[in-house]
Amino acid sequence: MSEAEARPSNFIRQIIEKDLAEGKHTSVQTRFPPEPNGYLHIGHAKSICLNFGVAQDYQGQCNLRFDDTNPEKEDLEYVDSIKTDVQWLGFQWAGDVHYSSDYFDELYGYAVELIEKGLAYVEELTPEQIREYRGTLTQPGKESPYRDRSIEENLALFEKMRNGEFKEGEACLRAKIDMASSFMVLRDPVLYRVRFAHHHQTGDKWCIYPMYDFTHCISDALENITHSLCTLEFQDNRRLYDWVLDNISIPCHPRQYEFSRLNLEYTVMSKRKLNQLVTEKLVEGWNDPRMPTISGLRRRGFTAASIREFCKRIGVTKQENMIEFGSLESCIRDDLNENAPRAMAVIDPVKVIIENFEASQTEVLNLANHPNKPEMGTREVPFTREIWIEREDFREEANKKYKRLVLGKEVRLRGAYVIKAERIEKDEQGQISTIYCSYDPETLGKNPADGRKVKGVIHWVSVDKGLPAEIRLYDRLFSVPNPAASDDFLSTINSESLVCKKGFVEASLAEAQPETGYQFERMGYFCADNQDSSSDALVFNRTVGLRDTWAKIEAS
Ligand code: ATP
Ligand code: MG
């Protein structure tokens, strides 16, 4: 089966297949056009998987083009992070990176062409007046008094704009289309505005910058894009996209197709809101593991394959939608359940002393790295007289449903022996400080000889040989499914979205590579933090729990 067949079809693939079959195009050329004003997020991943995916599957090419017409909001940091994220997701753009700003000279030329054809004019109404004159959805707009200037006058004024002879807001270039159009975008849209801003690519060469709608279609045409894929909010803009290309002397006319954006529960996707979280320091940065950004998800322990799988599962349609957070989580859970080695870590430790085990002795046990995959090998786990277990894995009293360690009863230590809790010691606050146990030396890898049944299995870490680690328990950043819908989305931040614990991990994890997932037995999937973890100060992030606990919370 080819890659294309392995991927579910969608309406865009059907259009492409038809175009190829009819010979309208001989190959497919797409582009991914981010504005470098923030880091990429999971919504962008949908667009990346679509654009690069169809190019791959139909032996075409996909360009990476920075849509950089707003110098004030853009930054090289974003350019760099976007390149890194696209490649990390497993895609490679065709040739060099492109920038809309590469085409500023051509764009200027096409603007002049529109003026020469009497299809554009220099406006001198103020931005407020332009807004007023535009009308509303129910009322037609009003024509500007500057609309019928002569071509010569417009050419001279546009040149003055370019030469810096107008202040910001004093003049702009508008297309002359139809102030009464039922499509607001066709009511003489602004094509160029004055901005005295330094641009990260073109420096101080320009003080006029083209608008998105004018830039995007021409950039697509200059790159011979066949299918220009964008999200539904650009549906009306398609009229302007086509108008511009129909009215300038450019041979290529790409077609625009719209699909619905990805919305994901318990998070926000607008870059403005994500930026606010960063600048107000409500998260550690764009790559905070709670952020829906590619770099945040990566740091959290999501694999590129799991994100691609997610994009495949959600599909591409024109339907507005809100995807459950759990569907993203189940993609990474499926991946890690299959591929992550197992290890033991105690997140909320209490000490166990096994009194009949020699203090000087260390028994090296060999534990499988994966229960169903012998090919993943084994690792050495030292067993000693003192071990840590999870505080919640011990109770002084409990009923039969509690299959862990209970005073006077037995439990099995994962990969090791059966132990029995004999007595406990408490500190001044009444908190259990030590559990004294005995072990049955005949129970390594086998049941007790006398037929006693021991039901529960708990995980553990050697006190002597284990390593201290900071363990960061991440959860959903917002406590409501649709934070963007609330008046003050910041007030819906989940105050328990990060809980830091001081725990212990088995010695083999000293070598854990950042971003490499492990299943900490019974506790979830974790990876070493790619910013803060080092071999002498380990920091692990919880990627996701073993099961979807939120599904239960929501059901109740
Ligand atoms: P914002 O509105 O938050 O600024 P944007 O859509 O302007 O985001 P761009 O950098 O312009 O962000 O997006 C680059 C490409 O990614 C565009 O083609 C856009 O349609 C697509 N994209 C952005 N967000 C999503 C999303 N949530 N789902 C699918 N595609 C998206
Ligand atoms: Mg945009």
Image (spheres, rainbow, N blue to C red):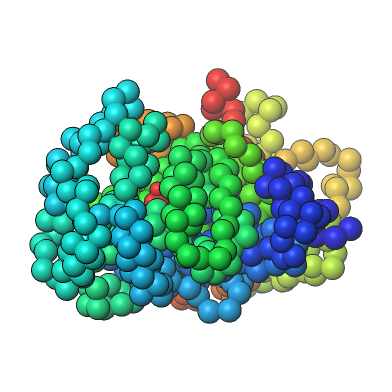
Q: Residue at x 35, y 44 (%)?
A: 177
Left or right: residue 213 compared with residue 54: left
- Identify the residue at the far top of this view: 556
Horizontal arrangement in the rendering, residue 343 relative to residue 34 (left or right) = right
Give the residue drawn at x 50%, y 65%.
250
Look at 30% across and 37% down and name the residue there.
179
Q: Position of residue 494 (x, y in %)?
A: 38, 38
Image x and y of residue 173, in percent: 25, 56
Q: Quadrant of the C terminus?
A: top right
> Would you identify the image quadrant in which residue 358 lies?
bottom right
What residue is drawn where x is 54% and y is 69%?
Answer: 223
Image position, residue 294 (x, y; %): 50, 58
Question: Quadrant of residue 462 in the image?
Answer: bottom right
Nearer to us in this view, 197 or 529: 197
Q: Is residue 547 above or below residue 500?
A: above
User: In screen coordinates, is 177 left or right of 340?
Assistant: left
Image height check: is 184 above or below 75? above
Foreground residue among 454 and 157: 157
Q: Is residue 324 above or below residue 541?
A: above
Instruction: Tell me the quarter of the picture where residue 80 sits.
Output: bottom left
State the quadrant of the N terminus: bottom right
Residue 529 image point, x, y percent: 48, 65
User: Does residue 396 appear anywhere in the picture?
Assistant: no
